[in-house]
Image (tube, rainbow, N blue to C red):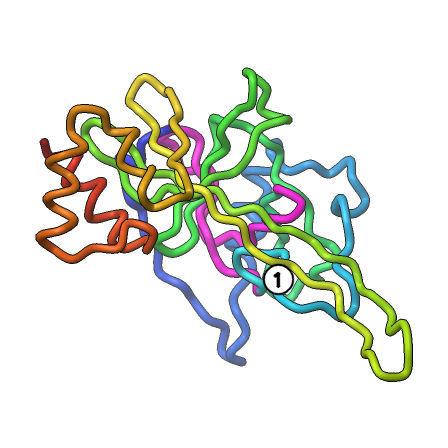
Amino acid sequence: MRMLLVLITMAVSFASNGQYETRGLTSDLQRVDTYVNRNDKDLKYEVPNDYEGSPYYNEAFVMGNIYEGNKLLGTNIPMRFNIFSNEIEVKENLATPNSEAKPLTKSSDIFVKMGNTIIVLIPFNGSDEEGSYFEVLFEGKKVDLMKKVEKEYSPPVKASSSITRDLKAAFTDDVTYFLQTKNGRMYQLPKAKHKKLSIFGPKEPALQAFIDENNLNINAQEDLLRVIRQYDSM
């Protein structure tokens, strides 16, 4: 994972009619064009017309930045994270139809920043194409805390009788947390609360005391972050 050493913010300009000024967006998108998969006419899958939940991290496109290492490739690019298809979708401007969005080419050298959210690609068995996107929750001196969200899809079900009802298609979240060491090794945190601390080895008693003292629920993300920060400071 590439460390974010510089934070670049740029002012957002608006046209006189209240629409977003797209000239800068177009040029920035051209700068990252090498990393946009334009061979695909469409994204890998289509969302059903009626469903519960969402396949996306962010349903609406938001303005974000694209980086290669510490180099800013493009700023204020409309993007959204499609968790279900494991793709970062980008488009030319906010007025561009969502159907014309294209997936960002998968590369572990590339990461995106949407607001305060950093999304990176972690290769699988050395393959970027087979890799998955993770949200970076914490970057420490010893370890980083990564969040992997998977979307489980349940297809629609037609009512089987007059006393039952149709069930919509649904997306549900399955969240897993990982610790990444500075040499790139990944450790999956167990989902069970009583097993999570076992990954910390000899630091487990001290962390358990910290949890008890502060009445923390290690299965809650904010409390887990406090525990990881405490571990990183030991």
Asked whether residue 161 appears in the rendered view, the answer is: yes
Q: Secondary structure at mark 1?
A: loop
Q: Please state if 192 lies on the left or on the right of 26 as rendered.
A: left
Q: Where residue 42 sits in the image (x, y, percent)?
A: 79, 47
The quadrant in which residue 168 appears is bottom right
| Depicted 139 relative to depicted 152: above or below | above
Q: Write the residue at 49% across / 29% down.
A: 122
| Depicted 10 relative to depicted 160: above or below | above
Say if the magenta span includes residue 65.
yes
Q: Write the residue at 15% across / 29% down.
A: 203
Q: Where residue 183 sits in the image (x, y, percent)?
A: 32, 17
Nearest the camera: 83 or 120?
Answer: 83
Asked whether residue 79 appears in the rendered view, the answer is: no
Q: Where residue 3 sits in the image (x, y, percent)?
A: 31, 31
| Depicted 55 relative to depicted 160: above or below | above
Boundaries of the magenta span:
60-86
Residue for badge 1: 54
The quadrant in which residue 136 appears is top left
Q: Identify residue type, mark 1.
A: Ser
